[in-house]
Amino acid sequence: LGFGKLNGIVNSMLVLVGVTVLFFLIGAVIVARRVAMIPTIRIVSTKQPPELSIVLGLTWHLFNSHIWSTGQDAAAVIKKQLMLLLPGVKIFLDVDDLKDIGALEQYIRGTTMILFFLSQGYFRSKNCLREIRSS
């Protein structure tokens, strides 16, 4: 019935799967080594990362206040870098977390501290001024 010819195909498929798994494992090891080399903030005395707790009722460690037109890209970079340096930190950034602009003051109240990224036009923005008043 021709089943004898399938052995070659099955063996080829097994070799292909084995090579694919090997490449995957090598890639995983490389990624793990790179992640281990990313610098993080550590406490000098313990050489451990700080324990990041949030007071009951609060949602974020940091609210990143900026104006969209001139500060959006920089605010996103600040968030990304802080999250790399402080694994587990919760940072509010409007493009990621804002659900309702009308609740802006509630987002501020749900945050431990605020970073005001002052770029051109910041003090002319109604929403930025709302964030300042709410803090």
Image: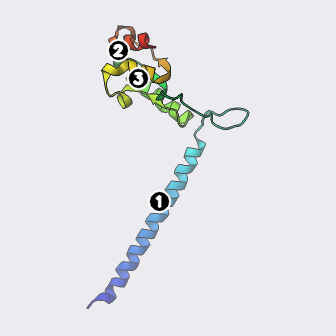
Secondary structure at numbered mark 3: helix
Q: Which residue is more in the foreground, 13 or 122?
A: 122
In percent of width and height, residue 124 lies at 35, 8
Q: Mark 3 and 2 residues: CB-CB less than 8 Å, in contact?
A: no
- For badge 1, the amino acid type reads Phe
Look at mark 2 in the image and give the residue it sits on: 127
The mark closer to the camera, 1 or 2, is 2
Look at mark 3 in the image and give the residue it sits on: 107
Residue sitting at x 61%, y 34%? 51
In the displayed orientation, state which residue is furthest to the right. Answer: 45
Q: Check disc 3: other Cα within 10 Å, few if <14, some if 14-19, many if 20+.
A: many
Q: Check disc 2: other Cα within 10 Å, few if <14, some if 14-19, many if 20+.
A: some
Look at mark 1 in the image and give the residue it sits on: 24
Check the image and report above or below for 107 versus 3. Answer: above
Q: For the residues marked 3 and 2, what is the alpha-carbon distance in whole angstroms?
A: 12 Å
Secondary structure at numbered mark 2: helix
Residue sitting at x 26%, y 91%? 1
Secondary structure at numbered mark 1: helix
Check the image and report above or below for 36 versus 53. Answer: below
In percent of width and height, residue 29 lies at 55, 55
Q: For the residues marked 1 and 2, what is the alpha-carbon distance in whole angstroms?
A: 47 Å
Relative placement, left or right, of 34 versus 45 is: left
